[in-house]
Amino acid sequence: EQHTPNSIFSRIPGSEIPQHKIKHSAKVTVVGVGNVGMACAQTMLSAGLLNELALVDVLEDRLQGELLDLQHSAAFLPRVKIVADTDYGVSADSDICIVTAGARQREGESRIDLLDRNVNLFKKIIPELVRHSPDTILLIVSNPVDILAYVSWKLSGLPPNRVIGSGTNLDSSRLRSLLADKFEVSALNVHGYIIGEHGDNSVPLWSSLSVANVPVLNFHDKKGVQYNKETLEEFHKAVVKSAYEVIRLKGYTSWAIGFSVASIVKSLLRDQMHVHPVSVLANSFYGIDYDVFLSLPAQLGSAGVLGIANLPITEDEAQRLQNSAKILRGMLDKSKM
Ligand code: 6V0
């Protein structure tokens, strides 16, 4: 496979030749009907993206309660078939399977122990999903999302274009909304990516950040504040802190991740070819030469990941990205995969 860094997009080696299918009927499964799973379901339903929604969880009562509650909204939504079961048969023939199931961190539990518990859950969940929907795209949301996306790729046997983690799509949106406030402009006109690991070790790309195509680095805002690297790093810190702040205040995060997932689902189902920073198999991109999942600017369509944008990034940004990759690979090597 030809990997040409001087083209705008390159396909992930090992991915399928994309078929651009217009789907007339879209089925999505959500595994895990907790705060995040239900925010995803609600946002996708409100956006009118689905013809069928399947919910799967291990908690029978919660599942049936959420099913009834959603079904009672029928008079306010386009017609959607909604089904729910603890049995994965209900997920059959899904175009996309979203996994938000997860164990929560116990007091005193290390990240790696939590990871091993989640890996054990995924060993049951992923093969079941793929058995019932061999043509599906997996969209992983559970944390640590980059690690679990890699685990899902391995467990599923799917080509890499059909395994995606929600990654830094959310972190990037948080950054864009902060800057939109400062520059008094729509967040849609703030163009920029946070890539790498979702969360604390994510990598902001200041060199390509722009507002309405004006590069932000070294420009001034209305109050005369110059946006140098140091100022911008404060924004990155605020982005990282904001997730903890939401959890401190309301106990979990849900709405923004719900909208983030719905935006990814829209690009996939409607073959939008839109670029999202999401977690993908990063081997052969940006100097990473081993298997690891982390967020890169990825073009998404009905075939999943169509290509990775070959953004020119600085030495420093590349270094941070490669460090992020090393940390993730180290966690994978330590886990009982
Ligand atoms: P939650 O409210 O505890 O929901 C988790 C759900 O998973 C519960 O309903 C469980 O019953 C269910 N579950 C557990 N085990 C299984 C299983 N084996 N099969 C099916 N269902 C199961 O958690 P919440 O919804 O708040 O968070 C879910 C996950 O999303 C966590 O891992 C979070 O860390 C992660 N998030 C990821 C984000 C991202 O940006 N990637 C953002 C927010 C949260």
Image (spheres, rainbow, N blue to C red):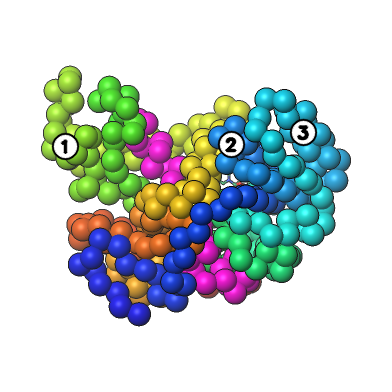
Label 3 vs 1, first from the N-terminus: 3
Q: Are marks 1 and 2 in contact (CB under 8 Å)?
A: no
CB of mark 3 within 8 Å of CB of mark 1?
no
Q: Disc 3 residue type? A: Gln
Separation (CA) of disc 2 from disc 3? 14 Å
As shown in the figure, which amino acid type bears the numbered disc 1?
Val
Residue toward you, 118 or 40: 40
Q: Does the residue labelled 1 lie within 8 Å of ligand 1?
A: no
Specify start and end residues of the magenta stretch as a single range: 152-178
- Left or right placement of residue 259 versus residue 3 in this view: right
On the image, numbered disc 2 is attached to which residue? 48
**Residue 243, above or below 112:** above
Residue occupying the point 71% across, 69% down = 131
Name the residue at the right extreme: 61
Q: Residue 170 carries which label?
A: none
> Which element is circle 3 on?
helix
Residue at image mark 3: 71
Helix, strand or loop at disc 2?
loop
Q: Earlier in the sequence, mark 1 or mark 2?
A: 2
Residue located 78% across and 38% down the image? 67
